[in-house]
Image: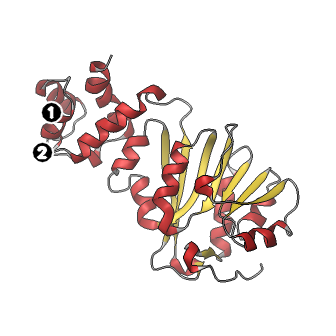
Amino acid sequence: MRTQRPGRHELGQNFLVDPTTIDTFVHLVADTDGPIIEIGTGDGALTLPLQRLGRPLTGVEIDGRRAARLARRVQPPTTIVHADFLRFRLPTAPHVLVGNLPFHQTTGMLRRILHAPGWTEAVLLVQWEVARRRAGVGGATMMTAQWWPWFAFGLAGRVPATAFRPRPGVDGGLLTVSRRERPLLPAHDLKRYQAFVQRAFTGRGRGLAEILAASLPHSSRRDVQNWLRRQRLPAGALPKNLTAEQWAELYRLGEGAGAR
């Protein structure tokens, strides 16, 4: 494999150079279906192996020089586009998103991805702690909970810092995201539901019993306590301890019912 040129500091580029990690990444993508859009191709460490899957592949690269060089190396149906992914117009037809995301832009890119239509699966290389938190390991974050009714998050493995050039200060993690075929809540409830989750995560209280009593204005304290009992959750549990299904049920219990 051709040696990666050092990444440009201002673009936050840490290129993947570890063959084992690249193979794992490609195998994860091989288990999906449909055209592929790669976020940040660099010099093609992932692009060229992904090309061998024989599926339409569009690489989006912000560095014009690298985009031009890689465009000369790929074969149809692979195409390379010089563009900033945060401003790139994604297709509405089904596709798969993949990429080694710049660590300093992970949050912005994840928000862009989650708001985008069309894609069905995503395989993303991000910071290890971000991958763990998004997958709900050790407790879900507010961002994960806000999107859980529509997406499933998974952790596919840890990637050591030595797998990148230049070497970052933290390890990476392989994060998978799947759009649910049967969402837990209807799409028109998205904004109300996300506002509810934000209230729960930022609300005051020593546990879910107190937090939810304030976050669910259309449900009584007794309703909340009965729900916690049915779920076998202690009153002192926290929002991060809830599952995707429990979040959706809580919303229906209070906020969703009151808004109708």
Q: Is residue 48 visible?
A: yes
Of the pair 23 and 215, the residue shown nearer to us: 215
Residue 216 in picture, x, y percent from top left: 21, 30
Q: What residue appears at the point 43 percent right and 54 percent down from the top-left corner?
A: 134
Is residue 196 positioned above or below 99 on the image? above
On the rendered image, what quadrant is the N terminus found in?
Answer: bottom right
Q: What residue appears at the point 15 percent right and 35 percent down from the top-left corner?
A: 214
- Look at mark 2 in the image and give the residue it sits on: 205
Q: What residue appears at the point 31 percent right and 40 percent down from the top-left corner?
A: 197
Q: Is residue 44 visible?
A: no
State which quadrant residue 192 falls in.
top left
- Look at mark 1 in the image and give the residue it sits on: 213
Residue 209 falls left or right of residue 17 = left
Of the pair 9 and 138, the residue shown nearer to us: 9
User: Mark 2 or 1 closer to N-term?
Assistant: 2
**Contact, mark 2 vs mark 1 (Cβ under 8 Å):** yes
Tag 1's secondary structure?
helix
Is residue 203 positioned above or below 162 on the image? above
Q: Amino acid at mark 1?
A: Ala
Residue 4 in picture, x, y percent from top left: 70, 80
Is residue 4 positioned above or below 230 on the image? below
Of the pair 229 and 59, the residue shown nearer to us: 59
Give the Cα separation between the discs numbered 2 and 1: 9 Å
Residue 45 falls left or right of residue 114 = right
State which quadrant residue 146 falls in.
top left
